[in-house]
Image (spheres, grey):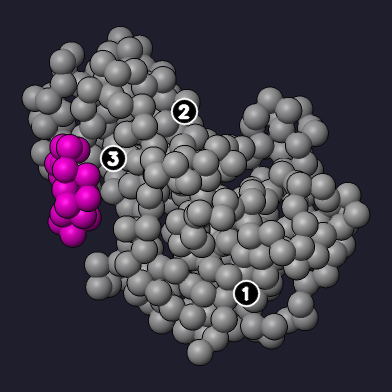
Amino acid sequence: MLTYTYIEHGHFGFVEKPAPRLLDPHDAIVRVTLGSICTSDLHIKHGSVPRAVPGVTVGHEMVGIVESVGSGVTKVRPGDRVAVNVETFCGECYFCRHGYVNNCTDKDGGWALGCRIDGGQAEMVRVPHADQGLSIIPDEVSDEQALFVGDILATGFWAARISEISSDDTVLIIGAGPTGICTLLCVMLKRPRRIIVCEKSEERRRFVTRHYPGVLVTEPDECLAFVAAHSDHGGADVVLEVAGGEDTFAMAWQAARPNAVVTVVAMYDKPQILPLPEMYGKNLTFKTGGVDGCDCDEILSLIADGRIDTTPLITHRFTLDRIDEAYRIFENHLDGVIKIAISGKSD
């Protein structure tokens, strides 16, 4: 089958591989009907994910149809439409039992698909621990509606859940890329008093204003003054840092009021500095880490109820055999791209 593969540092390309097969009783084989490209795929390409294995098929955002299941799988069966979780987790170790599935201690635990084992920029994919890693898509939810459930939408949902947002809060979201907008959608479910989005791209600021007219929008150079002018206590009550830019971590804690919560969702290419003498007395609570994607079933229910809609993020569509062009557009931020849907077939 056709796969898009991490060849070496800086190079992805097409490789023909055998179709995956069941290796464990808890595996499922999924035929990919729709996938996408994530910024984390670019991090692999550029060497920012040391655990990524050359030769691995990339891709971890996908939905599809179950082709076959191992004898230990009970949640899904062949023919089910499913959303695939970016994380692989056993459901039984200490971290899984406490809801921290990103830290699963299984050999395939955490972010494995498209990083350490073959992922979904292919016609089919093997999903370990399928009972945990697959969520059945309701009949009324389309593939495009469900496409981001297992990764960026799960990330936004997790970030909003741990950020202790109340109805009185001013919430600042730094970054209006795909994960930032998914985070925005999930913060909106909490109904805070006001939401401010800071984004450097004029195109993306316009996107937020057009689709979410109740949200305030600013840009990095004006962010600190804007937040101070539009909050009740000299800064945001909650800050979610989703950009991962050179100065966005510093902006996050500087924009927060004393005793605020700062949730760091972003993945950085370089270490960040925590200048404790400068922030002494602000008494901030930092929450950091990768997504613990154990809310996918609940997210799909919210989509089915019409409370979350990520389809406006899909600005481009390609077939698998044209994924090189899709990567070129996505990596270089061309043509107003936000997210690209890749169908699991060729022209």
- On whether residue 333 falls in the magenta region, the answer is no
| Disc 2/disc 1 C-alpha distance (Å) | 32 Å
Q: Amino acid at mark 1?
A: Ala
Identify residue type, mark 3. Ile
Q: Disc 3 designates what residue?
A: 174
Q: Work out whether residue 179 or residue 76 is closer to the camera in this orientation and state it.
A: 76
Of residue 243 and residue 86, the one placed in the foreground of this image is 86
Please state the horizontal and vertical placement of residue 196, each as a whole percent of the image.
21, 34
Residue named by callout 2 = 161
Earlier in the chain: of badge 3 and badge 1, it is 1
The quarter of the picture where the N terminus appears is bottom right
Q: Which residues are magenta?
A: 201-219
CA distance for labels 3 and 2: 17 Å
Residue at (51% x, 75% y) in the render = 343
Q: Taking the image as drawn, is residue 250 in sight?
A: no
Find residue 189 and report its image quarter.
top left
Residue at figure coordinates x 66%, y 37% from the top left? 101
Say whether marks 3 and 2 touch (CB < 8 Å): no
